[in-house]
Image (cartoon, helix red, strand yellow):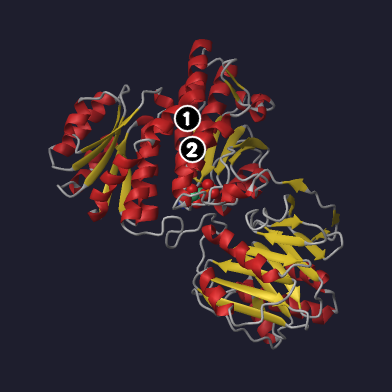
């Protein structure tokens, strides 16, 4: 979704802003722009449809001097992607420039009000309404920019993260946030603004996470000031980013997605570090230790998430019900939030999100909270909105995930859920000590088995090239691997644009079987567990209709292998942890199919990395 960058200090702002925009490209966008205040007292806006490279080209013969500026990548919501709709937007007098991430829900009534006051609008965006409103309020009440932003925002309904600069005020950068992410980097007498840490990390690791309804005033060589919309003064809390630059660079890989697939053993190590104690055969999660009674007394667990995180949540259901015997409901957050669900005060909601900024998941949390449920977060991004909205939780510590298609976020989410379940199950007595020890040991060493699968890279790559012809794929799995089938299908459709669906294998005969012919690739996830014979029958049904079978089987398998056109063998493991292995070849398959089709793997069309609008 939209990305925000800002700078105020002694340095040239333009290169910092452009580099920052490049760092935010992964979020997904369709236009880009920059506003700069130079030392002649001019406020220039340059913006173009398309990629940041276009913007750079467009600016190559322009005056891009100045030590204060704001920049933006836009993911269109109100109005098509175009030069005019791109941010920043000027106010009517062209004295104020503003960038915005989020949606102003009451923009139409505000627009009409401003039109009646003589304001003329150039774009179709809700953002232009905001900059005009700030100017109107400023003039009408003779306020400073800081006060005008605060006053204007109190009239706004919706979500925003904004950066604002003013021609007459070359030393001041104003920012504010509600619902959309915003971070301030604190340098030596300078400040940086970012939708996340990636445009900031190479300059400073000291950051302030702007809170909801907070307005920030930054001035070179002065302490920042923060006030909220109720006019209370907020003391900025400076925290240190635990992240280094190499984590957001490709490190020799052609794509972030491939890097992130290969990072999974390390991501799982970091995720389990200090939590899974193999030598003691024990799992320690502070979020669980401190709140075990909430789980002990839970009437039910609700899991709410979107996309890949929802798939991890579905695996969570299988885990919780098998090992803790607590009933679990899993629902995509966008449905949950609007269907008036029954929520009890002794429910526990587990909210799962890589970015920690997904608007629907955040809204589901607020709803559950309002009914008294206890909220446990499973997030990757430290300090994110969801992490802060939850009562407690466990970070996945996967490190920054830049590729739009989630990979290491998924495996670390599943690992966190497994850790939670084993720890809770042991406390509740539903997991016996010998079983617990076996589970802990398998989890601790699963990363080595992932390494073995990653070593199959070349054969998976050459197999993938065979399937570039396909228009559709079906993925089949059962039990713990049914959500993996859905996740494998999502990966393929996101980055290769091939239609794919994941089904519980036995459901195939209730409809999808009609699609099978000699053209149709069927990916069958069939490791050797209790349901093996059942899934073998499903494979035979596919074979009888000449489908092309790609199977994921346990090493040494003979029966399903004999029926398959292509086979990928994975090491033996415990069934409940098998998703951590079976998903790996599916991620690789999607990646290599997409590369063979020449797709933009890291920034697939129409998709955004963090979906901050509903
Ligand atoms: O940041 P979140 O985990 O909350 O994001 C949820 C989905 O938007 C996300 O998983 C999306 O489906 C990914 N593109 C999947 O690869």
Give the answer, above or below, for where 464 lies relative to 55.
above
What residue did someone put label 1 on?
Answer: 447
Q: Residue at x 45, y 37 (%)?
A: 314
> Which quadrant: the C terminus?
bottom right
Q: Secondary structure at mark 1?
A: helix
Residue at the bottom extreme?
118
Residue 344: image location, x then y, percent: 60, 36
Circle 1/circle 2 CB separation < 8 Å: yes
Residue 117: image location, x then y, percent: 71, 86
What's the mark number on residue 264? 2
Query: For mark 1, does the 10 Å Cα neighbourhood hold few (<14), some (14 to 19), or many (20 or more) residues?
Result: some
Give the answer, above or below, for where 578 lies relative to 121.
above
Query: For mark 2, does the 10 Å Cα neighbourhood hold few (<14), some (14 to 19), or many (20 or more) residues?
Result: many
Residue 539 left/right relative to 251:
left
> Which quadrant: the N terminus?
bottom right
Give the answer, above or below, for where 571 lies relative to 551.
above
- Of residues 182 and 141, the one drawn nearer to the viewer in this rendering: 182
Residue 136: image location, x then y, percent: 75, 80
Q: Residue at x 58, y 22 (%)?
A: 423
């Amino acid at each position: 979704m939209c990305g925000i960058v800002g700078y105020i200090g002694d340095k040239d702002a333009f290169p910092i802003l452009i580099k920052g925009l490049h760092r935010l490209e992964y979020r997904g966008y369709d236009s880009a722009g920059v506003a700069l205040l130079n030392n002649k007292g001019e406020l220039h806006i340059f913006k173009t449809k398309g990629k940041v490279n276009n913007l750079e080209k467009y600016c190559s013969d322009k005056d891009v001097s100045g030590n204060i500026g704001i920049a933006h990548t836009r993911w269109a919501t109100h109005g098509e992607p175009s030069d005019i709709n791109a941010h920043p937007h000027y106010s009517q007098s062209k004295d104020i420039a503003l960038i915005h991430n989020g949606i102003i829900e009451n923009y139409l009534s505000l627009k009409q009000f401003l039109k009646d006051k003589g304001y003329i609008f150039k774009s179709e965006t809700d953002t232009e309404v905001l900059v005009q409103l700030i100017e109107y309020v400023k003039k009408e009440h003779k306020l400073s920019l800081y006060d005008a932003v605060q006053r204007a925002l109190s009239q706004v309904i919706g979500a925003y993260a904004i950066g604002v600069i003013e021609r007459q005020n070359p030393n001041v950068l104003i920012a504010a946030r509600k619902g959309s992410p915003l971070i301030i980097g604190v340098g030596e007498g300078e400040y940086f603004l970012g939708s996340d840490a990636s445009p900031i990390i190479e300059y400073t690791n000291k950051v302030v996470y702007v809170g909801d309804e907070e307005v920030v005033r930054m001035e070179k060589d002065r302490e920042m000031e923060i006030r909220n919309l109720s006019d209370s003064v907020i003391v900025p809390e400076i925290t240190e980013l635990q992240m280094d630059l190499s984590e957001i660079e490709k490190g020799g890989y052609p794509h972030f997605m491939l890097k992130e697939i290969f990072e999974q053993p390390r991501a799982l190590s970091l995720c389990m570090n200090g939590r899974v104690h193999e030598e003691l055969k024990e799992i320690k999660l502070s979020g669980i230790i401190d709140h075990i009674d909430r789980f002990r007394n839970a009437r039910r667990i609700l899991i709410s998430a979107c996309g890949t995180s929802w798939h991890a949540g579905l695996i969570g259901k299988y885990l919780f019900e098998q090992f803790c015997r607590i009933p679990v409901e899993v629902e995509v957050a966008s449905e949950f939030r609007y269907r008036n669900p029954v929520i009890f005060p002794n429910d526990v909601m587990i909210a799962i999100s890589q970015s920690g900024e997904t608007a629907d998941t955040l809204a589901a949390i607020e709803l559950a909270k309002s009914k008294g449920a206890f909220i446990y977060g499973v997030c990757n991004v430290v300090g994110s909105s969801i992490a802060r909205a939850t009562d407690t939780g466990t970070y996945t510590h996967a490190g920054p995930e830049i590729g739009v298609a989630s990979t290491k976020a998924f495996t670390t989410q599943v690992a966190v859920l497994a850790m939670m379940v084993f720890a809770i199950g042991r406390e509740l007595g539903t997991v016996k000590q010998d079983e617990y020890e076996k589970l802990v040991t398998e989890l601790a060493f699963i990363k080595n088995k992932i390494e073995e699968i990653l070593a199959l890279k070349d054969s998976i790559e050459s197999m993938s090239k065979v399937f570039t012809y396909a228009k559709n794929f079906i993925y089949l799995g059962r039990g713990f691997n049914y959500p993996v089938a859905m996740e494998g299908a999502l990966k393929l459709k996101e980055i290769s644009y091939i239609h794919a669906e994941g089904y519980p294998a036995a459901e195939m005969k209730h409809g999808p079987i009609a699609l099978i012919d000699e053209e149709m690739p069927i990916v069958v996830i069939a490791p050797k567990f209790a349901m093996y014979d059942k899934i073998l029958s499903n494979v035979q049904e596919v074979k009888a209709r000449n489908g092309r079978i790609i199977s994921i089987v346990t090493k040494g398998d003979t029966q399903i292998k004999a029926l398959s056109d292509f086979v990928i063998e994975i090491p033996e493991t415990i069934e409940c942890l098998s998703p951590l292995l079976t998903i790996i070849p599916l991620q690789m398959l999607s990646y290599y199919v997409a590369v063979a089709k020449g797709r933009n793997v890291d920034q697939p069309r129409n998709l955004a990395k963090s979906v901050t609008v509903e």
